[in-house]
Structures are given as structure tokens and as C-alpha cells.
Image (cartoon, rainbow, N blue to C red):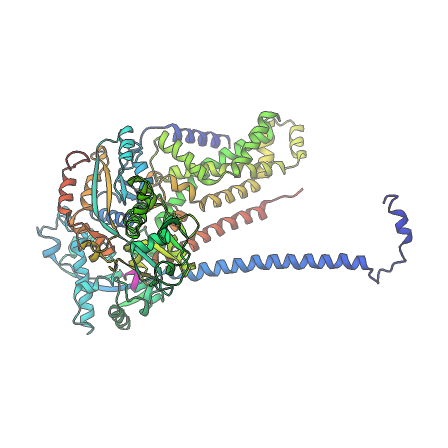
Amino acid sequence: MKTVTFTASALAIIAVSGTAAFARDNVQVAGSSTVLPYASIVAEAFGENFDFPTPVVESGGSSAGLKRFCEGVGTNTIDIANASRKIRDKEIKTCADNGVKDIMEVRIGYDGIVFASQKDGPAFTAFEPADLYNALGAKVLKDGALVDNPYTKWNEFNADLPDADINAFIPGTKHGTREVFEEKVLLKGCEDTGAMKAMVDAGMSEKDAEAGCMKVRTDGKSVDIDGDYTETLARLGSNPNGVGVFGLAFYENNTDTLKVATMSGVAPSTETIASGDYPVSRPLYFYVKKAHIGEIPGLKEYAEFFVSDDIAGPDGPLAQYGLVSDPELAKTQQAVADEVTMGSGM
Amino acid sequence: MSDATHPAAHKSPARSLHQLDARTKRRNASERRFKVMGIVAIGIGLAFLVLLLSTIVINGSTAFQQTFIKVPVYLDPAKLDKSGNRDPDDLKKATTFTYAPLVQNGLLEVVQKAGFGSELSKSDMKNLISASAASQVRDRVLADPSLIGKTVDFEIFASSRVDGYLKGRVHRDEIALDKNISVAQLDLVDSLRKDGALHKGFNWTFIFGADASDSRAEQAGIGIAMLGSFYMMLVVLVLALPIGVAASIYLEEFAKKNRFTDLIEVNISNLAAVPSIVFGILGLAAFIQFAHLPQSAPLVGGLVLTLMTLPTIIISTRAALKAVPPSIRDAALGVGASKMQSVFHHVLPLAMPGILTGTIIGLAQALGETAPLLLIGMVGYVATNTPEGFWDGFVSPNSAMPAQIYEWAKRADPAFYERAWGGIIILLIFLLGMNLIAIILRRKFERRW
């Protein structure tokens, strides 16, 4: 028993203090849960077709991924951060402070954001940004005056919408999707309804008015979902009047339970998003630590493989899954091949 | 009893044991009420257990079945081996994207030979078969290049939609908007089934296979994650058992009782109640950021779970040591044994069943833990590579069974959801097995004084 105890404690000490850095032979990726399915499809095909091990892809949200990305350089940090929004200046600064100076930005394509509800629920079939602003904005224009959002039913501000309680499930603030929702839906709706003009007239600066427009009501009619789309789906399942925000690919996998609403009269599909007719879409990115290229085997090959025509092209598996392929893919391919970093003339 | 009640006893009328007075009746009634409440409580508990288990079995049992399609694939040398020398390095240049059309052609031929859908093209076949088919064929060809130029039969996975249709998860009237399957394709599936090319079988891949990406739910398996759990449990067992037992023996048998040991005791009890995610944060800071151990490695997961399990093991070991009567120690010391001899020769063997039970229950708890693994990179698309050799298993990226289940439950394709329930069944079998061992050990070796 004694010897066992000794060996075990010795083992523990070696395990903890033996700081001889382990060489890592797999690419490590983390970030946006929207990009995760695409990244996992690429990682799987990469593992199958190359002699490198399959990369590890974690999720957790764009912000969480970029935070880990900016922790520093070295094999105990991640190589790639997936993001469903552009990296912020603040994050670039944090990165630089921690020694992550050369970052390659790779745009992989576009993703649509759709508004869906229970298939057999009320007829939420057509939305305008103005409707969603009236339903979810913190302050709305009612009878010419700016008031705290008083609406409880959809048909109170638009007679075409169903007589149903407002009950929306929107992505929480740690998701990149939230930012797109605020900018492309709430802000647009705020301008359309004239609420923004009222705010500016009331003496707010342009910037403050924009920030005010992007505030969401906090009286429980709008629920932030910090988890994934599956959580939103589950919440819709128990709320017949609920309206949820999903990625296009997630909706397309669940057409048996969900029905989607048009936005400004356009139904979401890869075609309408590619043509730019469907207004609520955003580019998806991944960020590569250039310092890790050459250190981590397969990192550059993975990045190149991700944007290759076979994968990210219009007929590739990513498009099949729901990604809207980038018309400027060739330019991205060239940039990755040349290892162009941010701020170096791209 | 006391003087105060004495006069009252005098006043009470003569009682008969055969005739119940009001007070006895009340007491009996309250006892009956209590029994009924107890039975109701147990009944509610049982009802929920039955509900839970039946939900799990109903939702999860389909994961153990999978639809396969038998497809003869012509391995076209013109496409697979352009240089014509069968050199393995050249053969690797033909990627799965080259193989995919060959498999689709093969299925198209089966369909047309059977006389259905002559107007269909090979892109219509894409939705019927799993995206994994191409890599399955490619692996086989790379392993045996002599197959090139021949037509070889492959048992390939049907796509998750086709599989869901045969299992009753996908319904004809609900797929109008689904771009991954169409009614015409389901008609084709029905005819292929009659024809015998399509059949259901036991899904070994689910039990032994690796995780799969979001586009091919049908190929996903829990096997690699199971290995990850195994390695973590190994680390926990090797570290937590000796450290825990040594600590408890010292605290219980050797340490002086003073303020300092009291403080340690309070802290151990507190640690047992700390939420597991806290150990994850600690593990991230101590093992990955400070000690530079690899991310996503079962070694780190095991170390974190060791920290989490230690208090449980120490507490149960101390209870087991305490349960050994002092007379055993006194007798050993009395015949001249040293303190250490009395502990290791007499007390510890008698306490062993209790220690093992505590350890196994601690391990079972660690086996079901997901939260701390989130922070050390073990949740996500991770469990994909089979470790190369025994020792590599400790450091190569891996997940764990509960983490894999959590991951599947998040994914978009409903077929993953079915697999999450299937994973729960496997995890439950492991947990039940471990608890059963604990019970058997206790029954068999426990001694009472």
C-alpha cells in the first residue's frame, strides 16, 4: 500500500509539474456555434483526405472563441477562432497585448438569419423590420410619442399579424447572431417606424439614438437565449405563440416542426441570400494565428482546404448544409495561400 | 412519569385493550395517514422513474438500428489512379470528392436495374446515401489498391433522412420544405426496400465508432468518447484512490485533533459541495495555462475529475475507518503491533469494502460529469481520432460520454437527438453496472459489529 501511495503521488507531481510542453499534432479550433457545423464538416473531410489528425473543433460563441484566441501564442492556446461576426478593434488590441500580432482573417461565406415559429402555431408568415422593432424594441413610437414598449400582442401595431401574445426568443448577447439581429432588424425597424427620428428630435445624438434603437425590451416578452438553437427550438415547442431566431441551416434541418417567415417580402434561402434580396444575413469568418503556421502541423493545409472550391464552393458540402457560398472565394483562397494578415493591405 | 401527570392517570376511566379510546384511535389514524403518505411518495418516485426510463428507452432504442444500402461500386481506374502505377502516394491524391460520384453512379445503376426512376440522375442519389460512403470506399481502396478496376459491393449507410423515414421519425407529409429529401426519393426508398437493396441492421458503428460532423449524423458513434471516459476513469482511479486513502488514514488514525486538523476537515467537507464547474476553471488555470498540459486531453480531464472525486473518497474512507471498532486497534497494539502495523494489518482490511464502495460511487459520479470538461476543451467536435497506442490515449484529444451526449443534443439534425438518447442508454448501463459492483462488494465483504 505504501509503495502504491508513493508512486501515485510521484506520478501526480510529475503530471503537474513536468512542464515539458507537449508537442501538439492536431489543429485546435474554437468559437461560434453557428460556424461549428461547417467547421466540423471541414475537419472531418480534412482528417479523411490528409495524413494529419482530424482537427478539434469546440463551440461556445464567437466572443468566447476570440477571447481564447487572444490569450497568447503557444501550443496550449487555440490556433483558429471561428466567428459569426468581424473581430472587434478591442479584441485585436487584446490580442496584440498578449503577443498575438499577425492574424489572418478568412471569410468563408454567408449565413442567413431567419424568424421561425411553430408549424401549427399562429400565422407568422411575413415580417417587416418595423414589426419586429415594434414588438421587441425598448422604446417605440406610439401616437407620435416615444413610450416604453406597451404592446402585448402582434396585431396591436400591424393588423396583418396574428392576434397572439408577443413571445420572442432571440440570441443572447454572447452570440454573434445578436449583433446582426440588432443592426439589420432592430436598427432598420427603428428607422422605418420613425422612432429613431423621434429620439434624435428629442435631443439625443445620432450615436445615442442608434444605441437606444438596439435596446431590447426587458419586460419578459423577449427572452435572451444564451444556449444554442436547439434551446430556442425547445422553447418554441412549449410556446405555441413563440417566435424564434435561427440560422438558415438549422431551420432547413427542422422544416418538419418549424415554419419560416419572410422578411420584407423575401423568403430566406441560399439563393435569396446570395443575391442579397434577403436582408438579414452576415458573413462568417475564421481567424488564424499566423505564428502557429509551421508550428502546428496541418494548420495552413486546413485553412486552405476550408476555402477550397471542393469544400466552400457552391456545390460543396458546406453549401449543401446551408452556407451561402462567397462569390469572392478565389480572392480568399489567394489570401490564405499568401498568408495575408490583417492590416497588411487586405 | 412525573408527578404532574400522576393525578390525571387517576381520573382516567378504566381501559380495555379491546376497546380503543379516542386518543388511541387518533394515534392509529395518524400512523395510517403517515403510511399512506409514504406509499404515495414512493409511488410518485416510482412513477417518475418509470416515465424517465421509458422515455429514454423509447427515444434512444432506435439509435441502435441503422439503415444500410448495398451498392456495387465500379472503382474506375481512370478517375482513381490517373498515373496508372497504383502508387499509394498517388492514390491518396484522389480525395473523397472523387469517390462520391462513383458511389452515386453505383446506386443509380441499382435503381435503374430494378426498373425504377429512369428519369433520375446521380445527383438525386446524393440525398439517399450518407456522405460517409465516399470515405468508406476510399479507405478500402487505399488499404487494397488491387480493387481498382473492379466492381465491389459496399454496405453503406443510408442518409439520416432515409433512416429516419424507416424508423418513423420522418413523415411524408412533413417534408414539403425539406431540401434534404423529397417524396419522390421516399418512393424510391420504398421500392429499394422491397427489392432488398436496402435493409435495417444493428448499428455497431454507434457503439464503437467516432463522432461525425453535422452533415452525417448516421455515422456518429460514441465509441471514441467511451475510450475518453475510460482513460479519465483510469487517471482518477490511479490518483484519487491512493491519495484519498492515504489522506484519510493519516487524518483518522495518526493526526492529532487540533484546530488545524479541524480546519482541514471543514475544508474537505466544503470541497465536496463545490460545484463541479469550479474544478473546471481550476483545471484550466493550473493544468493547461500553468503546467502547459495539452488541451482536450483525457489526462487533464482525469486530473480535474480527481480533484472533484477526492473529497467524496476521503469522506467515505474516513467513515469506513471510523466504523472499525477501537477494540480491534487495542488488541493489535496490545499484542505488540506498532501503530502502523495495527492500521495496515487490521483496520484497513476491515475498512476496505466501505472504501471501495465509496470509490466506485465517486467514480460513477465522475463518469457522469460534463461541466468541468467544457472548460478544458473536451466538448465539441472532438472525439474523432482513435488513439495511437495505449499511452497516446492519455494525451490525444478526446471527449467523454456525457460530453458527447450534450454535444449531440445541441446539433441541428434530429438524428443526432436520437443518438443523444441512445448515448444516455449506454451511459446508464455503465452507471448501473458500477453501482451494482459497489452493492455486491458491500454485501459480500461488509462486517457488522
In the picture, measured across the screen, residue A188 lies left or right of residue B28, that is left
> Farthest bottom residue?
B115
On screen, A87 above or below A233? above
Q: Quadrant of residue B2?
A: top right
Q: How many numbered discs?
A: 0
**Residue B138, image x, y percentages:** 20, 53
Q: In this orientation, which residue lies closer to the viewer: A162 or B366?
A: A162
At x 35%, y 52%, the residue is: A144
Does the magenta segment cover residue B384? no
**Residue B274, image x, y percentages:** 50, 38
Q: In this orientation, which residue lies closer to the viewer: A127 or A294?
A: A127
**Residue B119, image x, y percentages:** 16, 71
> Farthest left residue?
B83
Q: Which residues are magenta?
A: B157-161
On screen, B422 above or below A218? below
Q: In this orientation, which residue lies closer to the viewer: B33 or B436?
A: B33
Q: Is residue A286 visible?
A: yes
Q: Is residue B410 visible?
A: no
Identify the image quadrant of the C terminus of chain B. top right
At x 21%, y 57%, the residue is: A272
Identify the image quadrant of the N terminus of chain B. top right
On screen, B16 above or below B330? below
In the picture, measured across the screen, residue B94 lies left or right of residue B323, that is left
Q: In this orientation, which residue lies closer to the viewer: A288 or B337?
A: A288
**Residue B133, image x, y percentages:** 23, 57
Q: Quadrant of residue B257?
A: top right
